[in-house]
Amino acid sequence: MNRKFLWSCCVLMLCAWNVSAQHRTCAAEEVLQQQLLNNPAMRQEMDRIEEHVQKFAQTAHDRTVITIPVVVHVVWYNSTQNISDDEILSQITVLNDDFRRTNADAGNTPSAFQGVAADCEINFCMATQDPNGNATSGIERRQTTVNGFSTNDNVKFYSSGGLDAWDRDRYLNIWVCNLSSGLLGYAQFPGGPANTDGVVCDYAYFGTINSSPPFDKGRTATHEVGHWLNCYHIWGDDGTSCSGSDVVSDTPNQADENYGCPSFPQVSCSNGPNGDMFMNYMDYTDDACMNLFTAGQKNRMQSLFSAGGAREALASSPGCEAPSGDQCNAPAGLNATGVTQSSATCNWNAVNGATSYTLEWKKNSDPGWTVVNNITGTSHTLNGLAAGTLYDFRVKADCDGTGSNYSSTAQFTTVSNCSDQYETNNTNGTAKSVPINTAFTAQIAYSGDKDYYKFGNTSSQKNIKVELTTLPFDYDLKLYRGTTLVGTSENGGTQDELIILNNATVSTNYKAYVYGYNGAWSNTQCYTFKASRRSTAWRTDGSDTDPGEEIPVEVVFENVGFGLFPNPANDQVVVEVPMENEGQVSVTILDPSGKMALSQHRTLAKGDNQFNFQLNQLPNGVYFVQVRNGELAHTRKLVIQR
């Protein structure tokens, strides 16, 4: 497509893919415009890179195979997201196959395009030494409290729950995490900021092991690394106007992206008889239908590593070379034993010729290390540790004054200082009786763990309040009377959960149900639970300092839910509440901190009832709508978006 280059859609593209309908879509424009707004000089750098590409294409070159060291930063919220080393290595295999055109499906390229299909002569290897020259596996991991990153680059900074980039002149940085809103991944083109340079992929679409179809062949990373190597979307991001460009001459002009697995030929923009090159890695087809880069795309990639190219330094990176200091090998076999709430013993294998060892250790959440020198054995006990905390440690050997590199980092987690005295209580039928008006701590200790607690009220103390606080992750709360659901609280993130029933039916069989949203759990951190009752009504904002309004009429909903539309909303939202009989109901809109933003309270008639809220005074964002009455409470998320 040798047409006018559309900077507004292509320069420094950050590509985000959404799979809500098993399709890929791109949020490049909004991210690009924000970056250009933040740094106008970026456009000049992109112009310089493009000029270099065009000069490179006009000159003969001796081709050399480039090998790029890769570091994979795994940022995980739960164990499912903490993908294995094998999953990571399977992705590196895919990158090597796709960029060297040794992919098994290369033969699926239509004969019309076989002549331009290219071996890009780019290899990828896992880094074997880190930026300090220490031995590394090329994989670093961090457990985070963020369950869902976006294209704002927070995953690329330790301070915002992610991991910092390694030197971009020596490594390709790939972050693997849980991306929110169905995003598969995004990448930064050459020319952007150094501390955000690299590729981000969702853990569910990385590699070929345990990945989710139809994006289970590792082509998410292939596409994103293609962007990182200066290749644009094949249709030029121009919609269906046929006027965009990917600045490559051997990719046919095409109208818009292709999805799924089209049949060849797929003709658009008068590009018959062969039609679109929809099997190109830079289109939007499913993984199984992608199988080539072209010679023109290879030219763009190779220009980056030539003299004066934007990624020239990577061609001579030592990131995949064995670390120096071979006369004294780095210790191996690191493990931790005797782990308690406040101590752990760090162990490692002996190194031939070593006279002593140096141990470095830290909390996983801390940036700096604590050093222990001159250890003569192959173990050391750490004391004074924090309970329920993830720690890192590494070791180097001293061989008569010649020090080795540090070993790869090992980890252990101290025992939590909170007990879970009511296990096992994973079902309604095994709910454990708990004291009233007494707070205690407990755990959702693994994915699928559930906690049920049983308590009652009395005729003199009918009013019930159930609280869930100090949440380590996104936990939610439901309340049953027997097997009948009478209340729900599903706030986002680590916001407290609260259910209030004023003038509730007297029963000894109330059961509170605590569970992790989307499998959230922690075997090191606890939540706090408290069930309270009293004679005066609780205030609907959750405070217990003053009596609230008594609601003597028990109201029964036709179902647990309620209508909420439109959602996302603009300047108005309608809450529809179905009633089986007349009763008093309050509807409250809460901001993300749990503070009341808008509220209505009135007597409703039997049938469908509507509450209308004007939202023009509320800023864009996520809110929560709570419908409450004397017996039921239910919460739904509301998005205000203009």
Image (cartoon, rainbow, N blue to C red):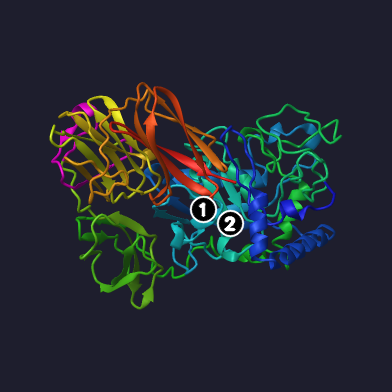
At horizontal 66% and vertical 33% (from top left) the residue drawn is: 289
Residue 440: give x, y in percent of width and height: 18, 47
At horizontal 13% and vertical 32% (from top left) the residue drawn is: 459
Residue extending furthest toward the bottom: 401
Residue 198: mark in rendering:
2
Residue 46: give x, y in percent of width and height: 73, 62
**Residue with the mark numbered 1:** 175
Instruction: Using the rendered image of the protein, determine whether residue 396 is visible from the camera's viewpoint.
Output: yes
Relative to 496, 537 lies left or right: left
Name the main secondary structure of what is drawn in magenta. Answer: loop
Q: Amino acid at mark 2?
A: Gly
Q: Helix, strand or loop at disc 1?
A: strand
Q: Which residues are magenta?
A: 422-448
Residue 53: give x, y in percent of width and height: 78, 59
Residue 447: give x, y in percent of width and height: 33, 38
Q: Quadrant of residue 351?
A: bottom left
Q: Amino acid at mark 1?
A: Trp
- In the rendered view, tell whether residue 468 sits above or below residue 386: above
Category of crowding for the residue at label 1, using alpha-carbon neighbours closer than 10 angstroms: few (below 14), some (14–19), many (at least 20): many
- In the rendered view, tell whether residue 110 sits above or below residue 419: above
